[in-house]
Image (tube, rainbow, N blue to C red):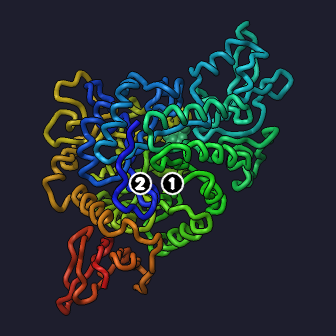
Amino acid sequence: MTTPAQPAASPAPWWRTAAIYQIYVRSFADGNGDGVGDIRGISERLPYLRDLGVDAVWLTPWYVSPMADAGYDVADYRDIDPLFGDLAEAEALLAAAHAQGLRVVVDLVPNHCSDQHPWFREALAGGPGAAARELFWFLPGRGPEGELPPNDWVSYFGGPAWSRITEPDGSPGPWYLHMFAPEQPDLNWEHPRVRAEFEDILRFWLDRGADGFRVDVAHGLAKKPGLPDVGPEPDVTDLPYQDVAGVHQIYRDWRRIVAGYPGERVLVGEVWLPSPAQYARYLRPDELHSAFNFDFLCAPWEPAALRRVIDETFAAHEPVGAPPTWVLSNHDTIRHVTRYGRADTSFDMGDKRLGDPSDERLGRRRARAAALLTLALPGGVYVYQGDELGLPEVRDLPDEVLQDPTFVRSGGADRGRDGCRVPLPWAADAPAFGFSPPDARATPWLPQPAGWGALAVDAQRADPDSTLSLYRSALALRRERLRGLPETLRWVASAPDVLCFDRVGALRCLVNLGEAPAPLPAGAEVLLASGPLTTTADGGRAVPPDTAVWLAPA
Ligand code: NOJ
């Protein structure tokens, strides 16, 4: 087992302030030339991540999977899918990352498994009365012939959350629950074998040096007894399939396991819930260590809304003592360069508005300012691969290349999440922009836009004004100046369209979200700016619209 060295005199556990880089494994770097990202590709790029200046990486699922939902349908939680490599390579990657000072958080998918998982196969093959059916939610259908689903729940991916099985003798059988695709049957967390199995899976990866887990659908594991209908006008704060009280005991049990390992291992929740109060309960001191702040991700690029969500974030986290986190994009959302270039800059998972016009130049300008905002805030921060390159969402992928199940299940109404999953450009002039090795036998699994050479890592590395250079400088300054500070900020009085706060003693962050330039005080020392400053009529300097600066403390 390997664990990276703690920074000298670390005042707080690493995860309270970490910058965590999300690697979407199939789209990060292809080491073996089959057009799909893999462990070898990640290993080769570790120096890139070290130089970028992040503290840790989160790897999306790399387990054996039929890939009905890009790996979020796991058939074997203790082995690696051959598409990505093998277990020995995974172990070597953990060790190599640690040797570079990077921690590794792996994805854990406990709400559901794959329909090809041995348990589900056993449940189907064993016929009525098979013990393995107890590990899932098999229920008889309603209606005279059991021809209707057991309740009215709708899958997050569209369509009913239930599918009916055919028994081994060919007769119609019961229905099983799948809150996502039919290939992702929900596990029954009331069953002790499910609990024991996942505790063992946690230990399996902790023993191999994983520094923590990103817990998929953390709000969804427990279901309300009896699986009642939601009814025509559901109360979104009290749904029978999310945020059901019993879920918290699961995390208390896991926290004890994780705490038994050296090196500050962590549990990070994917907790999508309507109210900050519900969300915060997952972050009580004996549950998850942290979670993704989706309210911040969903907020529009507007000063009052951002300030409100920042204040609400602190208000929610403080009582439970958890660090706030900040995230702008991930593999399920619309890349924020594109979102911030639209008239409506907010994000709504239920209505992604992928077709809305977007001004990419404006969006990137705002995304750069947003980078300085998020990296200045107290707590942890997530960088989704490609954020640091200013990649936009790819919105013109042809139907025939789309792979996300949401596209098919919504009958094409939702074009899905493939547009934020396009393989990274590494080299402007290489085939596949260097995503695959030069002698690759296949093209990237999703086509990259022709213009992405200009956004490639090698093109940006050479340009001090690139988004990559901005991220590198900001991450370095963040490390130097902000690590170890109290997890608080002090708002500074400013014009209504300007967000300005101090990380006391370390830096002042000023973000201009208005339409007029925001003048800087005479003598202010600019540490970093997301874009060029302008000059005022009286010869002073000003921060133009949609630009952020970090200033030395006054
Ligand atoms: C959340 C993951 O981020 C998403 O990609 C996946 O489709 C669902 N959970 C289901 O596992």
Q: Position of residue 97 (x, y in %)?
A: 32, 41
Q: Quadrant of the C terminus?
A: bottom left
- Label 1 beta carbon within 8 A of ligand 1: no
Q: Residue at x 22, y 76 (%)?
A: 533
Corner quadrant of residue 465: bottom left
Report whether residue 374 is seen: yes
N-terminal of the two: label 2 or label 1?
A: 1
Which residue occupies the foreground of this view, 236 or 9? 9
The kind of secondary structure element at disc 1 is loop
Residue found at the far right of this picture? 144
Q: Residue at x 34, y 27 (%)?
A: 89
Q: Position of residue 358 (x, y in %)?
A: 36, 57
Residue at image mark 2: 382
Between the residue at mark 2 and the residue at mark 1, the CA separation in whole angstroms equals: 8 Å
Residue at image mark 1: 292
Amino acid type of the residue that numbered disc 2 sits on in the rendered structure: Tyr
Check the image and report above or below for 410 versus 219. Answer: above
Amino acid type of the residue that numbered disc 1 sits on in the rendered structure: Phe
Classify 10 Å Cα crowding around label 1: few (below 14), some (14-19), many (20 and above): many
Residue found at the far bottom of this picture? 538
Q: Residue at x 37, y 68 (%)?
A: 376
Q: Position of residue 316 (x, y in %)?
A: 59, 66
Q: Quadrant of the N terminus?
A: top left
